[in-house]
Each structure stands twice: as structure tokens, then as C-alpha cells.
Amino acid sequence: MSGIYVYSDRLEIAAELIGFAKSGGQAAYALCFSQAEADQLASRGADKVIYLKGDSPLPENYGKALADYLKEQDAELLVVGATARGRDMAARVAGYLDCGMVSDVAALDYSNGQLNTERIIYGGAVVQSETISGFCVVTVAGGKFSPVSGQAEIKTVAVQADPRVTLVETAPITKEGVDLKQAASVVCVGLGLEKEADLKMARDLADVLNAELGCTRGISEERHWLPVEQYIGISGAVIKPQLYISMGVSGQIQHIFGVRDAQFIVAIDSNEKAPIFKFADYGIVGDMYEIIPLLTETLKA
Amino acid sequence: MSKIIACYKWVADEADIRINPDQSVDITKAKGKISDYDKNAIEAAVEAAGKLGGQAVTLTFGNAGAKPSIKDALSRGPEEAYWVKAAEADQADGAVTARALAAAIQKIGDSSLVICAEGASDTYARQIAPRIGAILNLPVISSVIIMTFEGNSLVATRKLEDSLETVKVELPAVVAVLPEANNPPLPGLKAVMAAGKKPLTEYSAADLGIDFKPRNQVVAVKGYVMNRKNIIFDAGDSVSRVKELAAALRKEGVL
Ligand SMILES: Cc1cc2nc3c(=O)[nH]c(=O)nc-3n(C[C@H](O)[C@H](O)[C@H](O)COP(=O)(O)OP(=O)(O)OC[C@H]3O[C@@H](n4cnc5c(N)ncnc54)[C@H](O)[C@@H]3O)c2cc1C
């Protein structure tokens, strides 16, 4: 069955990818590795749900089986949701089939057997456009396409799972941080903050603005002053508040990637040459230990 | 002795990239560096060699400009360096890079573990470890934050979006580590001096018989530009600057 094959370990993303495949008028085949996933996918508008059935609980162990299956079916394109598992599986399939792959695309278009993509490189500084013809693999994050609905038949195919990696245990991660993605305003602290106790200064400003507190990577990953969910950037949260105010953030491209869609960017930094000012709508060059308490007081009034 | 191979990429430092007004990209003034996360891969290999036994070595695929990377990589603890030196590295996509590294890994011979970072700081495509595993038919574990060894087995903890997953594999295997896996120390002066004396093996494309044909075709590279107001309040003292800022925000209706 030639057509577009889609996979995600997240049901919602899988449904969106089916929506993408259908939008171009192609046949959409949804792949999965358990009966439970197959049952859920069956109402998501695919032309068929394909359940590759083996005896491993780890989707990654079906990389080879999936590659062989896609080849046998003469698949045109494999679209995979860009999660940790999805990226891994997608690259394995590409490796087994020695085919092209574009990771984490910002935009994609598939027509006349050609895939056109755009993706971010150099931490967000550069956008690269690529094309591939012939069978290829692409990964894309959730939230880019609209899901569709409709009943699909489930086809079960018995396959051999790779037995070499075995599951020992799995434990949920408890998230301690707030969800910055929904925040209307965000106050962001960077490594210019001298000590943990000074977070109070940022919190006071956040309180008068009714804002959430965010940070740069070093504040959470190195200094462990805030939970990892609270750091903003290409490897952290990508946010779109109305207002983002930074203090002691130099504005490296990887961080800026996370605030591009902020409506207004305000920067307070002591270094007038800090890149953050190029990305800011409004800025004050100065010591945040002086400026921020003043700003908090002014806004209170 | 069995080798533990850390793969790394020599990349242009993104902080030095200039975007011209016409959105064209100038990387000619960019300094090279070992991709940030690959320092975690090198450190992971050194730590693994300490626990598992064997010899930590580094492997890179790069053009002649990657020369300074060798000493830098070796100063981080590995005992030997391997370099697939080819101008084609500049145009390489994931398929080509994985083929080149896999061919070198085969040539190096007896290895118990291949360690990559999840992705390079320029492209961050996160393809290489799984692709190498597929090419060499080795098991792969990605998104790894903890590695422990039991005899000849690796027990690895993976960090997924909302769970920690512990898996086990008999070596040899390919691993991709996340930056949380370790904290690479800055190399000391002694380590830097010693690095110059460690052996380097260079492979040419001919030595390895690599197919350099990329699958992906790059059709455009454009700088990302963001249009912002860039208004700096610099008149008067701090109090008046802050007042102006507050007034501007009020006017924008974001307070
Ligand atoms: C592959 C990769 C991915 C990355 N992903 C991310 C990411 O997702 N998110 C992220 O944040 N980073 C990320 N980084 C790191 C990023 O490159 C920067 O290193 C980081 O964002 C810098 O954080 P910072 O601005 O807090 O610190 P610094 O760059 O150290 O800046 C501190 C700033 O504070 C100012 N300052 C100091 N004292 C004061 C004072 N008293 N008053 C006012 N200003 C003061 C200084 O002038 C300086 O501008 C990534 C890096 C790589 C290589």
C-alpha cells in the first residue's frame, strides 16, 4: 500500500499527522505497536490502522520491523511525531533504509513525491530549506496540523521485535514547575542573578504583573534554583506571552528561540552590548538590583 | 583492549554567526568548537571506561578545519583520537555522517560502546546514534541520563517527556546521552599538555569506502530576523527611565 505512513507514541500527535497526510489527498496509514493504541487510533480518520504486533513493550524495538514493512509496502513517506521515542524510531528507520530524513521541521509540504521542509539550525539563528525525493522520513512536533475523524479498519501484522534491549522499569516524572506556555506575562531571570535568595526580587515583580516566573537554562540546569520546566528556550519551554521581561539575561540565540512569539520583549541588563537588546522592544541598560525594585514600585503605584 | 568510542562534531560557534541585512548568513568569522553536548558524550565515554574497563577514544568526521578539535577532545580524557578527514563533511546530511562514522567504527574494530550526544549544536537533528545502530546492526539506547554496568551489560535510564525508563542491554551497543548525563570538567593544563602526545589515526574516504552522496538537498539557508522596536530608555536617572518604561508598557496595553 503506497501512501503516507504516520507514527507517534502520542495519540494526539498521531491524529494530527493523519490530518496532515489526508490534507494532501493521499492515503494515510497510522502505525502502532499495541492493541490499545490501535483501538484508539481507529476513530481518527486514517485509511487504515496498522498494528505491528510483536512481544516487546518498547516501540523502539520495532525499528527494523517497521523499516522492513515500509519497504515491502512501497511507502512514500514516513511522518513521525517529534517526541523522544519518535525521533529515535524515525532515525532508525532512516538508518535501516539508508534514506533521507529531516528532523523537527518547522514547516513541511509533500507534493508530487517531493518533500519540502524548513527547519531551524544554529540554535535558532538560521532557517534551512531542504528537499528530498523518494522515500524519506520526517519528524514534526505536535500542534502543527488539525486532527480529523473517521473510522478505520485495524490490520494486524505479526512482526519480530528486536529482543536485545529489555525494559527494567518505568517511573513517571513529577513535574514541579508551572506551565509557562499558557502564561500571559513572564518575568525571566538569567545568570546575572547573584544568589538564589534574590529570586524574591523577580517574584515581587512577577506578582505585581500577575506574571509567571521563568529563567534561562543555567538557572535551572546548573544552579538548580528553579525547576527545569521553567527554563525557556530551544531546549526548554517555547512561550508566547503578551509580555516577557528579562533581567540579567544576555539573550543568546538558544534562549531567544523560546520567546520569539512574545508580543513585547523588555530587557534589563547591565551590559549595553548584550544581544538581548537587539531582540527587545524596550530596554533599560542598568543594574537589575536597582532597576527591578524601582519597576516593581512604579507598577504598584 | 575493547574501546569506548565517543563521537563528536566540530561545529561553527553559533554566537559568531552574522546575519546580513538581506538575510544571507555569514559563518566565515565563526570560530570552531566541539559541539557543546558532545562534551557530555566524551565525558560519558571516559566515565564508562573507568567503570567498565577498556579504552575511551574519540571519533570525528570533519574537514581539514577540524584539526584543532583533536587536541581539545583528547584533553578531556580519552586516550586516542580517530578522524575521518574529508571535505565532503561540509555537505553531509544525517545519512552520510552516519555512514562515515559507522565505517570508521568498523575499521577501529573491537568496541564495546559507541556514545553520541542526542544532537549537535548546529543542526540538532538527533539522528546519528540510531542511524549508526541501524547500519552496524547494534542495539541503540537514546535519551540516556544514567549509565551503570553489570558485568557486560549496560543498565541505562532514559529521560522521556513524562517518564524515566530504565532498560538493559548486553554490550556492544550505541548510546545517545542527554546533557544531564554528566558535568564535563574543564580540562586542566596538564591534561592539555598530555593531549598533544596522544595518538591520532586519520582515515580518508578511500580508506573507508564511504558513499558521500547526501539524500537531502539543501535549497536555501536564511538568517532568522525578528523585527522589534529596539527602544532603549537612556535619558535621565534610573527613576525616570523606569517611569518611561512603565508608561510605554501601559500605552501598549500589556499591564
Ligand atoms: C545546544 C544548546 C542549547 C541551549 N538551549 C538553551 C535553552 O533552551 N535556554 C537557555 O536559556 N539557554 C540555552 N542554551 C544556553 C545559551 O547558549 C546561553 O548560554 C544561556 O541562555 C545564557 O544564560 P544567561 O543569559 O542567563 O547567562 P549569561 O549569558 O551569563 O548572561 C548573564 C547576563 O546578566 C547580565 N548581568 C550580570 N549582572 C547583572 C546585573 N547586576 N544587572 C543586570 N544584568 C546583569 C550580564 O551582562 C549578562 O548579559 C543552550 C546552549 C546550547 C549550546
Image: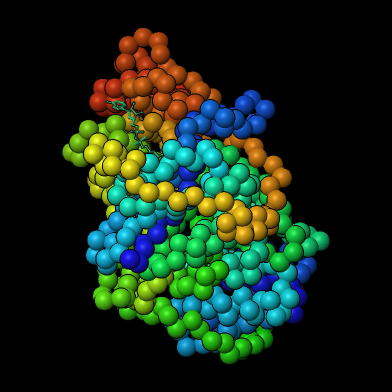
Question: Which residue is more in the foreground, A164 or B254?
Answer: A164
Residue at screen point 29% across, 49% down = B77
Residue B247 image offset from top left, x and y in percent? 43, 22
Instruction: Determine which quarter of the picture holds residue A246.
Output: top left
Is B41 situated above or below A151?
A: above
Q: Residue furthest right?
A: A112
Residue A47 image offset from top left, x and y in percent? 71, 78
Question: Which residue is more in the foreground, A247 or B53?
Answer: B53
Is A86 situated above or below A2?
A: above
Label tally:
0
Instruction: Determine which quarter of the picture holds residue B48.
Output: bottom left
Horizontally, is A55 left or right of B238 in the view?
Answer: right
The coloring applied to the image is rainbow
Quadrant where the image shows the C terminus of chain A: top left
Question: Which residue is more in the foreground, B181 or A258?
Answer: B181
Q: Residue furthest left?
A: A197
Instruction: Determine which quarter of the picture holds residue B113.
Output: bottom left
Residue at screen point 60% across, 53% down = B205
Quadrant where the image shows the N terminus of chain A: bottom right
Horizontally, is B241 left or right of B218 in the view?
Answer: left
Residue at screen point 48% across, 43% down = B10
Residue A53 image offset from top left, x and y in percent? 55, 87
Is B9 situated above or below A53?
A: above
Residue at screen point 61% across, 55% down = B206
Look at the image and tell me whether residue B49 can be seen: yes
Question: Which residue is more in the foreground, A92 or A225?
Answer: A92
